[in-house]
Amino acid sequence: EKVLQYAAGGTEDITGSRCSPYTFQWSANAYTALRATLEYVSKTMPDKKKIYTITADYAFGQSLLRYAQVAAKELGLELVGNDNHPSGERQFTQYFTKALSTRPDLICLLTAGADAVSAVRQFHSFGVKTVQLVGPWTLEIEQMQELSPAMLNGMILGLNYYQDIDTPVNKAFVERYLKAYNTVPSYAAAYGYDSMRTLFMAMEKAKSIDVEAVIKTLEGMQYDSIFGPTHIDARTHQTVRPYYVVKCKAPDAMKNKFDMAAIVSQGESPQPPELNQCKRTV
């Protein structure tokens, strides 16, 4: 249909094997997400080497698993097992029982949304203190609010967006959002705001609303976003931006009901060119 789309999906296909001249990707590449999250784990918990993964069995989850394998190899970590789960899974006990039997140091949840909420609740019920729970792309602020701080305490998450990002554009956005809705912006709200803001800037620069003209402007465009200095890869249409790692806070460390985690690291490692399957040329 030749309609310009600024997407926010998790699968690498958007900027990889199914890349399109009309599609751009706002979310970080799955490689960037896994590398940032596991790099933080590797640096801060050098004795934790063995990882068991539980993966959503669709394109998003399988992209995360692929790059969990790549990043783990790069960082000297060992993947000791994996289970795939169907979308809509609500019973994760079987997966945790199997995972714990391998004596992992970390369990990595490569899933999201309601499935992830169910998984975290059930892991908490196991009462395991020796295994670190990690979610490289697992919970956003709205899902975190469905769980008690006690359940989240100490969990390490990777996020495309968190309200505490310290940039002028984001601070202004969060202030206006809080005033309008009496809550902090979620991943979806940040995506909607930042992607539309980027498209409007491209239209202004192109001095046109013609799709082809805006696409040409977006390709390689450098600008200031909620993430700070940002640019778009001209060939793959991937937005090159940071990915954030947060550590969930203990209940008594929270300043308010929105203060559920602290940003502890961020990564910007781009997907290695040899792993990208986009055949488009600029």
Image (cartoon, rainbow, N blue to C red):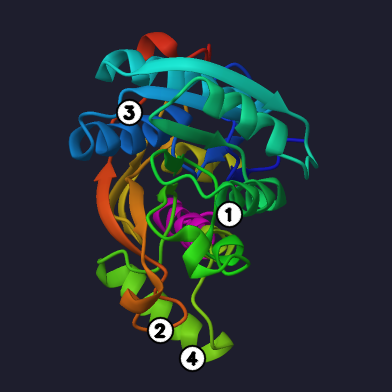
Q: Give the residue at x 26% y 66%.
A: 167
- Mark 2 vs mark 3: give the one in front: 2
Question: Dot 4 corresponds to which residue?
Answer: 179
Neighbours of disc 2 within 10 Å: few (<14), some (14-19), many (20+):
few
Q: Main secondary structure of the magenta part?
A: helix
* Amino acid carrying mark 3 in the image: Pro
- Mark 1 vs mark 4: give the one in front: 4
User: How many angstroms separate mark 3 from mark 1 (CA)?
Assistant: 30 Å
Q: Give the residue at x 40% y 74%.
A: 251
Say whether residue 282 is visible. no
What secondary structure is marked by label 2? loop
Where residue 6 sits: x, y (%)?
A: 58, 46
Q: Earlier in the sequence, mark 2 or mark 3?
A: 2
User: How many angstroms separate mark 3 from mark 4 (CA)?
Assistant: 35 Å
In the picture, which quadrant includes the N terminus?
top right
Q: Earlier in the sequence, mark 4 or mark 2?
A: 4
Q: Quadrant of residue 78?
A: top left
Left or right placement of residue 8 versus residue 203 in this view: right
* Amino acid carrying mark 4 in the image: Lys
Where residue 37 sits: x, y (%)?
A: 35, 38
Q: Specify the label residue 256 is tagged with.
A: 2
* Amino acid carrying mark 2 in the image: Asn
Q: Which residues are magenta?
A: 193-210
Q: Nearer the viewer, residue 143 or 185?
A: 143
Left or right placement of residue 223 versus residue 52 in this view: left
Q: Specify the label residue 270 is tagged with.
A: 3
User: How many angstroms separate mark 4 from mark 2 (CA)?
Assistant: 16 Å
Q: Give the residue at x 47% y 63%.
A: 197
Where residue 64 sits: x, y (%)?
A: 53, 28
> Measured along the vertical axis of the image, is residue 169 above or below residue 54?
below
